[in-house]
């Protein structure tokens, strides 16, 4: 009984520590002043995750910019999902590519991690021109945070 109670308490405590991206967006929307910006971190394992993440980011962008019209937003993808954005995968992952094109057309840069790409012998030129290249995804995120951007991790 004690073990079960302890496990339940640990689970509840840990779930409080792990805020979801939805919670992060709600906190931003609660602010009275426009934040310096928002950087979305996308780190997953496959194209399906990427497609869902990009669709959520588009909705979050629209919601955030409805309240804060001049809010700057950026997206950094640095997990295995980023390979869905390679030019050779554009047809197979049309939805993800179209989402990126929409974001980029609305002045939201979408970065991939060149370092992670290099681990699979993929180079910057293997991505379409509308994809921005970050030497290192985590470093790109940190640069945005140093500019005052709020990090939202897409889970």
Image (cartoon, rainbow, N blue to C red):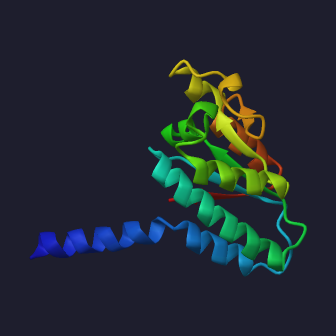
Q: Is residue 152 above or below residue 24?
A: above
Residue 50 appears left or right of 25: left
Q: Is residue 88 above or below residue 5?
A: above
Residue under the image location 53 percent in, 46 percent down: 43
Residue 132 appears left or right of 57: right
* Residue 30 x, y percent position in the rendering: 72, 81
Residue 144 appears left or right of 23: right
* Residue 39 x, y percent position in the rendering: 72, 54
Relative depth, front residue between 11 and 115: 115
Residue under the image location 13 percent in, 74 percent down: 2
Residue 10 appears left or right of 72: left
Q: Is residue 12 above or below residue 151?
A: below
* Residue 3 x, y percent position in the rendering: 13, 69
Relative depth, front residue between 8 and 138: 138
* Residue 153 x, y percent position in the rendering: 58, 57
Residue under the image location 31 percent in, 69 percent down: 11
């Amino acid at each position: 009984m004690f073990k079960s109670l302890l496990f339940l308490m640990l689970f509840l405590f840990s779930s409080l520590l792990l805020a979801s991206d939805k919670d992060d967006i709600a906190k931003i929307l609660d602010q009275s002043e426009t934040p310096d910006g928002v950087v979305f971190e996308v780190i997953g394992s496959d194209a399906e995750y990427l497609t869902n993440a990009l669709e959520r980011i588009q909705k979050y962008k629209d919601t955030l910019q409805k309240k804060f019209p001049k809010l700057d937003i950026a997206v950094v993808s640095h997990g295995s999902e980023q390979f869905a954005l390679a030019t050779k995968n554009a047809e197979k992952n049309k939805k993800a590519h179209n989402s990126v094109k929409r974001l980029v057309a609305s002045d939201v840069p979408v970065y991939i991690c060149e370092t992670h790409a290099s681990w699979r012998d993929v180079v910057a030129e293997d991505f379409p021109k509308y994809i921005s290249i970050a030497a290192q995804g985590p470093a790109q995120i940190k640069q945005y945070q140093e500019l005052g951007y709020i990090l939202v991790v897409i889970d």
